C-alpha cells in the first residue's frame, strides 16, 4: 500500500518504530538507536526523522524527539502510570488517550496539578467509561491554530479545579480563557482520536471526519468550527 503524505517505506518504518518503542517503554529511541534497530545509516535515519517532523508526525527539540502524540519525552504537566510503564502525556488530551491506545496498558493513573492553585489531581482512566470528576478542562488554542506553535498549544491544554481557578490563572498569566469543557468530554475526545497510530500504514482523519469526532465527543463548536 502506498504510504500517505508522500512518505517513503523507510519513513513509515521509522514512524512505527518510534511509536511502538514509546508505547512499550515510555521512552523515544534516539537517532543512533533507530539506525541500529532498523539497519539504516545514521544519515538516512536522521532524514526520516526530519521528514516525519515536517509531516507533523513528530515534534523535535534540538533535533531530538519531544512529542510523538500522544507521547511526550518531557514534562508537559501529565504523568500516566500504567501497570508496568510510566509515560509523559503531551497534554490533557494526550494523557487521557494513552490508555486507549496502548493495549498492554488499558488502565492508568493520570496525575497533574491545577495551574491555578497547584492542587494535585488524579484520575484512574480506562476504556470503560469517563472517570468521575467535576474539574474544568481548558484548551487555550483553537484547533485551526494548534500547529502554529504546537508546543505552546500542548502546554496550554490543562485541567483546572474549577472556573475560579481558571479565572485566577488567566488574570495572573495575562492569557485569555479559551475553550472549556468537562472530564467526560475529554475522555470521549481522547478515546478514539489516535486509533491506528501504532499500526501501519497510519492515515490521519480528514478534516470533516475530525469535526464529526469533535462534535460526537461533545467538544464545544467554538474550538473546532
Image (cartoon, grey):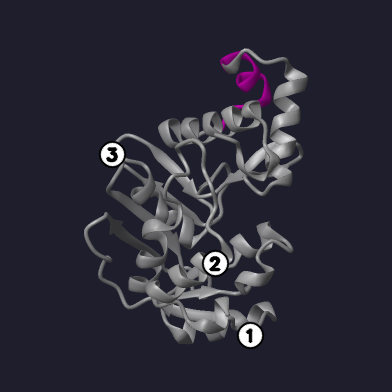
| For the residues bearing labels 3 and 1, Cβ distance under 8 angstroms | no
Using the numbered discs, state the Cα–Cα distance from disc 2 to disc 1 in whole angstroms: 17 Å
Residue reaching furthest to the front? 1
Name the N-terminal-most of marks 2 and 1: 2
Q: Name the residue under label 3.
A: 83
Give the percent coordinates (x, y) of residue 158: 51, 67
Count numbered badges in the picture. Answer: 3
Which of the 4 quarters of the picture holds residue 35? Answer: top right
User: Disc 3 and disc 2: Cα gap in Å?
Assistant: 25 Å
* Residue drawn at point x = 67 percent, y = 15 percent: 40
**Foreground tag (3 vs 1):** 3
Residue 113 in picture, x, y percent from top left: 45, 64
Q: Which residue is drawn at 46% across and 71% down?
A: 212
Task: List the residue tagged with mark 2.
Answer: 157
Q: Does the magenta stretch include residue 165?
A: no
- State whether residue 50 is above or below residue 91: above
For residue 8, above or below residue 166: above
Secondary element type, mark 1? helix
What secondary structure is marked by label 2? strand
| Mark 3 secondary-structure assignment | loop
Secondary structure mostly seen in magenta is helix
Q: Where is residue 184 in the image (x, y as percent from the top left)?
A: 33, 72
In front of the other: 185 or 91: 185
**In this picture, is 55 found above or below 156?**
above
User: Dot 2 surroundings within 10 Å: few (below 14), some, or many (20 or more)?
Assistant: many
Mark 3 vs 2, N-terminal side: 3
Residue at numbered disc 1:
171
- How dense is the environment of label 1, judged by Cα within 10 Å: few (below 14), some, or many (20 and up)? few
Image quadrant for the C terminus?
Answer: bottom right
Read off the magenta span: 28-37
**Which numbered mark, 2 or 1, is in the foreground of this view?**
2
Amino acid at each position: 500500500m502506498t504510504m500517505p503524505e508522500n512518505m517513503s517505506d523507510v519513513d513509515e518504518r521509522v514512524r512505527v518504530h518510534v511509536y511502538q518503542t514509546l508505547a512499550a517503554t515510555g521512552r523515544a529511541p534516539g537517532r543512533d538507536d533507530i539506525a541500529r534497530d532498523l539497519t539504516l545509516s545514521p544519515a538516512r535515519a536522521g532524514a526520516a526523522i526530519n521528514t516525519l517532523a515536517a509531516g507533523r508526525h513528530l515534534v523535535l527539540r534540538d533535533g531530538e524527539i519531544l512529542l510523538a502524540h500522544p507521547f511526550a519525552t518531557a514534562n508537559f504537566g501529565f504523568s500516566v502510570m500504567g501497570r508496568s510503564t510510566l509515560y509523559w502525556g503531551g497534554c490533557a488530551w494526550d494523557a487521557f488517550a494513552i490508555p486507549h491506545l496502548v493495549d498492554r496498558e488499558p488502565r492508568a493513573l493520570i496525575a497533574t496539578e491545577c495551574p491555578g492553585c497547584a492542587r494535585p489531581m488524579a484520575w484512574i482512566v480506562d476504556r470503560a467509561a469517563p472517570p468521575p470528576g467535576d474539574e474544568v478542562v481548558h484548551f487555550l488554542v483553537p484547533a485551526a491554530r494548534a500547529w502554529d506553535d504546537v508546543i505552546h498549544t500542548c502546554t496550554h491544554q490543562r485541567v483546572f479545579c474549577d472556573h475560579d481557578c481558571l479565572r485566577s490563572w488567566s488574570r495572573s498569566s495575562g492569557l485569555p480563557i479559551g475553550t472549556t469543557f468537562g472530564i467526560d468530554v475529554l475522555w470521549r475526545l481522547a478515546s478514539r482520536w489516535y486509533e491506528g497510530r501504532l499500526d501501519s500504514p497510519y492515515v490521519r482523519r480528514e478534516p470533516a471526519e475530525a469535526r464529526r469526532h469533535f462534535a460526537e465527543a461533545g467538544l464545544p463548536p467554538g474550538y473546532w468550527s
